[in-house]
Image: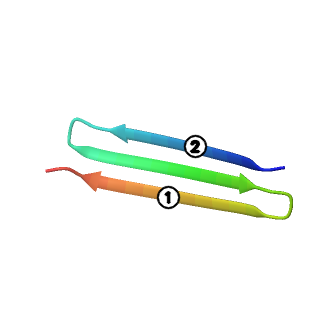
Amino acid sequence: MLGNLGLGLQGGTRDNLEIMVEYGLNVGQDFLSQRGMARFAVHF
């Protein structure tokens, strides 16, 4: 059995700020893998 899950959230403001958060999960019969990422950006 193999399963994949990905979740993400992204938002921005009128002040040109952006934040993004992601989470990933991979599950197999003999393994489990998790990953996460966060990003913050200021656009000018």
Residue 1, position as x, y percentages in the image: 84, 49
Which one is nearer the viewer's eye here, 22 or 29? Answer: 29
Identified by mark 1, the residue type is: Met
In this image, 23 relative to 21: left or right?
Answer: right
Q: Earlier in the sequence, mark 2 or mark 1?
A: 2
Choose top left, top right, bottom left or bottom right for residue 12: top left
Question: Residue 26 or 40: which is nearer the viewer?
Answer: 26
Amino acid type, label 2: Leu
Q: What residue lies at 48% left-to-right and 49% top-to-bottom?
A: 21
Q: Which residue is mark 2?
A: 7
Residue 39 at x, y = what percent? 39, 56
- Compared with 2, 33 (above or below) is below
Q: Position of residue 22 (x, y in %)?
A: 52, 50
Residue receiving disc 1: 37
**Residue 19, above or below 13:** below
Spot the residue most to the left: 44
**How many numbered marks does the figure carry?**
2
The residue lying at 28 percent from left, 37 percent from top is: 13
Task: Report helix, strand or loop for mark 2.
Answer: strand
Say left or right for 21 vs 33.
left
Q: Identify whether 8 is placed above or below 32.
A: above
Q: Secondary structure at mark 1?
A: strand
Residue 5 in percent (x, y) is at: 66, 45
Q: Residue at 20% across / 41% down in the picture?
A: 15
| Structural crowding at the residue carrying mark 2, measured as other residues with C-alpha within 10 Å and reported as few (<14), some (14–19) or many (≥20) | few
Alpha-carbon span between mark 2 and mark 1? 11 Å
Identified at 42% across, 41% down, the residue is: 10
